[in-house]
Amino acid sequence: MATETPLDVKSTLNLTKTDFPQKANLGQREPERLERWRETDLYHDILRARAGLPVFILHDGPPYANSDIHIGTAVNKILKDFVVKSHSMMGYCAPYVPGYDCHGLPIELHVDKKLGAKKAEMDPVEFRRFCRDYAENALRRQTRDFQRLGVFGEWDHPYMTMSHAYEAHIARIFGKFVERGYIYKGARPVYWCITDQTALADHEVEYKDHTSPSIYVKFPLPPGQVQELKNRITSWESKEGATAPDLASVGSKPVYVLIWTTTPWTLPANIGITVHPNFTYAAVDFGSEVYIVASDLVGAVRENCGLNSPRILVEFPGHLLEGLRARHAWLDRDSLLMTGTFVTLGGEADAETELDVRDEQRKGTGKSGTGCVHTAPGHGHDDFVIGQQYRTQLQPIYDQLRRAGMMPATSEATDVYCPVSNAGRFTDDVERFSGMKVFQANRPIVDYMRETGALLFTEDYTHRYPHCWRCKNPVIFRATAQWFISMDAKGTGTRSLRQGALEETDATTWVPSWGRERMRNMLAKRPDWCVSRQRLWGVPIPAFYCRGCKQILLTPDLINHVASIFETDSADAWYSRPASDLVPEGFACPGCGGRDFEKETDILDVWFDAGSSSIAALEHEYQLPWPADVYLEGGDQYRGWFNSSLMVGLAVHGKAPFKTVVTHGWTVDGEGRAMHKSTGNAVSPNKVMESSGAEILRLWVASSDFNDDMRVSDEILKRQIDAYRKLRNTARFALGNIFDFDPATDAVPESEMLEIDRWALAVTRQVVAKAVEAYKRFDYTAVYHALYNYATVTLSAIYFDILKDRLYTFAPASTARRSAQTALYRIGEVLALLLSPILPFTSDEIWEHLPGERERSVHIATFPDGTPGSGDASLIKRWDRILEVRSLVQKALEEKRAAREIGGSLEAKVIINTDGKLYRFLREYQDILPSILIVSQVELRGEGDDVTGSEAPRSGGDETAEGKRYAIRIAVEHAAGLKCERCWNWSETVGRDSRYPTLDSRCIQQIEEGWGAGKVVG
Ligand SMILES: [Zn+2]
Ligand SMILES: [Zn+2]
Ligand SMILES: [Zn+2]
């Protein structure tokens, strides 16, 4: 009914409506949602929903419970949460049991400092109680912060390596190693921190640059020994048919075996020199003296020591030197010549710089050595091994040392001469240098050798040297009596731990794949695992010593008995009870029948504690499947937790405790530098969470390639805030346009939906498949890019842009609008589901704002199905073509707008001139082209037509993504007719209906259908 009452146009538009806020206010809202999750026990609800489904276990490597979380620990936990949440969304039952590493030196040192002098009056149990309290406090704070990150898990019951049950398991697992014959006690050189006065495992040292004196030292070869060498050379020559013209002159001048070292302080412990049996050595006349060095290094020695031109007197293989006795450079003692294949030509196998460093020297610095290696079994791994090999020949030297009281008279321990105390000082029997700290002794030793003429050359030398991971001071290699896990003993089994570990490493999936090689290299070279520590805060090594016959009592039965005491009373029992209360009733020494026992005082390496977690926590405490599906830690854990866990898995079950190992890089600042509190470039996760929200940190983690170092700075986080806003707005658009949509009654079957809506769903399925596939590969960067691109380009820039007109102006219940809403509804769901592992707060918020019946939290739901529909491929192909034309048109419109010939794109009429094939294709879409191109009118012209003369043909379309398959020319002119007051489209129908003079025919039709004439017109 036409009346004079003016039309209220606004009331006939479907304006967006949602209480999903535009401003996320994450810093404040996240804690509220966390509280709701906690109150409603969401974590266990998720597990209940997955009951009976296949189980997926990410086993948590326990962070050390001694400080607040930093950006690195936050990244680690967030990545783990991505793994757990995404697998839960894939339909696995994925419980997450977080853990804490509670024993160990850092806590002990901290408590030491706090207690000061009071510690002296304290008994071990009381001291351990302080340590326990300290760990408990730290882990409580960490738990709070990890939860704040949005990480789901058993936060009320994390596993703790200091729990009574866990301590008992550590002891039992040690018993397993004993049972398998892998444990031995021996005097062996180990890394030793002279500051902390404890042994260190090789994964507890860090390599840093360190300057040492590089020295060339002369060990005299006495005339009798020179003669012996000449004899050997002569008989070898007659066998080989070679001749050495200058053999006679060897010996007419003093002859020295020349060694090179960077640790002068190890020289007092020298008992031999090792040469390679197969290398060629030369006696070289350098003027007044003759030196024996490897032939290949003659030039290097001359150059390094600034010597005159050398004259090679004779060359011979290294094995001819074996068994000869040189003299110590200054001490009244022999130095035995031995042969070993560890000798290289790239520099001395420095007594202290084991493993990685030796390789580096081989490749890098090189040419520093002499091929004659100073050997001190008390101060080097290779030295120790070769010392054992030559025990018999070394006996006279050891006897001399024993007579002088420099080595224990009893031969109870292995024969190793190591004149350095726990504090790193020379023992009293070291002539001239007794009582000196070893590093400070370097200089006096060098000076003394210069005085006595033993020194040939010295200079400062910077090399990579092991430092203590805790106190950061350089460590030494020192032989002490320690407990070891043998890497090469087969024990009761068929393969050694090393063999087993290498085989299991091959059978494990490594992400990134180079992890396998890195693990293999580490395992191939690692020495026996020194598991004893001279400390208090840990699990004691449950060994007894018989006071009667001195033998070690260490059997699985005894250990299991002790473990059952730990189970009820904690490992404190070891300190609070006498030995007689720790052994089974009536127990007597099997050797002598004695009943008087002493307790071992060493504790176990904390890495043994952490390595026990798959058995103690996963298998026993939580009774979850073993092995775990995934271990995920930083790259420093190859030598650390991956390694110790693997050893425990092999000892207990003969298998690796993991199927897949994922490693991530370090966090560095925006310029790629390490972050330090002192440099002021550290990003505090707690501060970011407070100001911007945990979601921003999580989004940053997802956007960063964790295979590499991950850069973070305020600037980088700002970009993520921006990205988050875009994602949020995309979701908000979908929610804002389905406020009047009930999926139960309003959804349009997909087959009846408009083609563009079906296209949107086809693309959505494609994104689902891509994202879920990437989640499976742990490739969160790919997930991030897929979803970000989907949200900002496919949806916001294209689909939503096109939909606006239909959503706002069409009759509310029209099929066209319901079709769009059906698509938006599904898109909203998909966004929430796919984002849920990365943005757990926001996805849950989206989920709550979606209409219809659904699980109470997105985290209880599962990922949508990404299987393509039967027509998806062709649909996507057709629309790729249309969208290509759209982007060409947009370019043309942009130029017109820039030239101020049109305002908004709705003022435009677009003329598309193209050849037959594309023309026929576009004709099918003639009716909807204006809405797709967001212009008021579109005119299609086929082959042979021409674009109006006044308009310059647009040639931008000649180049298409598909090459020059078709030609297209686009012209833009002002749209004909008048602007419709309601939809702002220009139309020649505006003004034709006297009832609605300001509207176009399309709007009039929609108003009548949707609102009824009476309602709006008074
Ligand atoms: Zn230290
Ligand atoms: Zn006994
Ligand atoms: Zn209109």
Image (cartoon, helix red, strand yellow):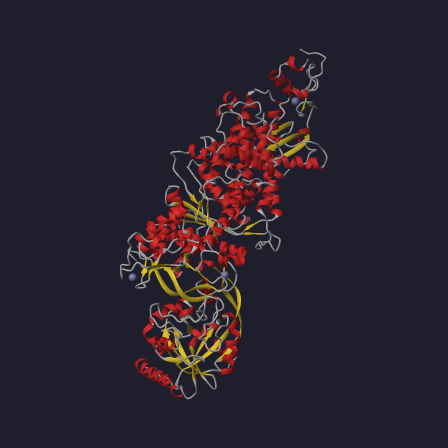
Nearest the eye: 261 or 652 = 652
Q: Is residue 271 above or below residue 706?
A: below
Q: Is residue 514 above or below residue 220?
A: above
The residue depicted at 54 percent of the width and 36 percent of the height is 34
The residue depicted at 44 percent of the width and 36 percent of the height is 90
Give how far across and how far down residue 322 sits, in percent.
Answer: 35, 77
Nearest the eye: 842 or 722 = 842
Counting every numbered tag in the picture gives 0
Can residue 762 be seen from the camera position used here?
Answer: no
Residue that sits furthest to the front in the current view: 121
Give how far across and how far down residue 646 sits, in percent.
Answer: 38, 52
In which quadrant of the rendered image does the N terminus lie?
Answer: top right
Nearest the eye: 365 or 655 = 655
Give how far across and how far down residue 559 sits, in percent.
Answer: 33, 53
Give how far across and how far down residue 602 sits, in percent.
Answer: 41, 59
In which quadrant of the rendered image does the C terminus lie?
Answer: top right
Nearest the eye: 354 or 285 = 354
